[in-house]
Amino acid sequence: MPIKVLLDTDIGSDIDDAICLAYLLANPDCDLLGITTVSGEAQRRAMMASALCRAAGADVPVYPGAECPLLVEQAQPTAPQANALGRWDHQTDFPRCQAVEFLRRTIRSHPGEVVLLSIGPLTNLALLFATDREVPSLLKALVMMCGVFTHRMPNTAPAEWNAAGDPHATAIVYRANAPVHRSVGLDVTRQVTMDAAEVRQRFRAAGGLLRPVLDFAEVWFGGGRNVVTFHDPLAAATLFDPGVCGFERGAVEVELTSPRLLGMTHWRAGGDDAPHEVALTVDPQRFFNHYFSVF
């Protein structure tokens, strides 16, 4: 039976969000119940999500969500890849100020059945969990691309982008009591990369839903980037092939005291009753084989 998924995304900044959404839409084992967007220009991000849904022939509700973090300044005010929307049919009118209520209503309509997949800053989720404290316990699982949990990667800030984008929201979400509370962090996702030439070759060969994604990717490459890291698709893939990553249980605390380290995730291994599970290893080839198999 397909897995019911709600996706919360900041599609339009890093290209991996669009790559992730295309994977969910193409995956026959995914029942995508809805999409909420977060971060600056949430409506333009929603337009991008709707463009991929229409390219897939899927009628998926899309709701623009919070554009500003709870307390800190917004570090991601725009959605540059939305500049490629002119070539793709997309929705332009969306329900306003209803994203959190949509998430709450959908989860309560399917208790114990929904995986909430977060691949952006955690503002929408924090507002949801603060509004209805029972909601996390009604999930099947909470799965996030968030944090750094093992060695600090070379040339990488100590706090991962999604965690640091709204650190106070991140702290709220890590305190939530979900049946499965899973994080796939930067120290693992940075091991699944592909250079621009191979992305172009493989996406063109796959065609279909990856064609609009490649259009969005060209905006990404135009910023001087020549490598794609499959951060968010890896987190999504663990829903359908958990063996792509190795997990360990433990506890995560979020740094809120040091101004320089806001959003840094402190990981401590624990026993079977620990509240969080964190990806510590990844099989890149297994991931890529699985990812492209759905197209």
Image: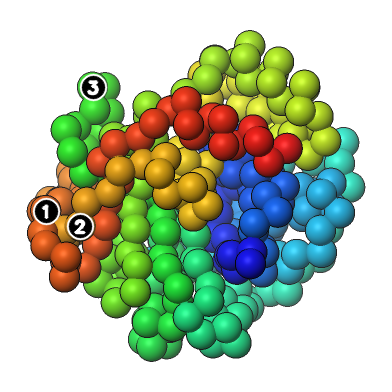
Res 50 quadrant in image = bottom right
Helix, strand or loop at disc 1? Answer: strand
Q: 46 or 234, which lies in front?
A: 234
> Any mark on residue 110, and which?
none
Q: Mark 2 points at which residue?
A: 249
Q: As displayed, is residue 68 above or below residue 265? A: below
Q: Name the residue under label 1.
A: 269
Q: As displayed, is residue 192 above or below residue 47? A: above
Cβ atoms at labels 1 and 2 below 8 Å apart: yes
Q: Disc 1 to disc 2, how far (Cα)? A: 6 Å
Residue at 36% x, 41% y: name it: 245
Residue at 82% x, 49% y: name it: 56
Helix, strand or loop at disc 2? Answer: strand
> Any mark on residue 154, and which?
3
Kind of residue at badge 1: Ala
Q: Disc 1 to disc 3, how far (Cα)? A: 23 Å
| Residue 29 % position (x, y) | 64, 56
Closer to the chain start, of discs 1 and 3, is 3
| Residue 55 % position (x, y) | 84, 46
Q: Disc 2 to disc 3, how far (Cα)? A: 25 Å
Q: Which of marks 2 and 3 is in front?
A: 2
Kind of residue at badge 2: Arg
Q: As displayed, is residue 215 above or below residue 109? A: above
Q: 284 or 75, which lies in front?
A: 284
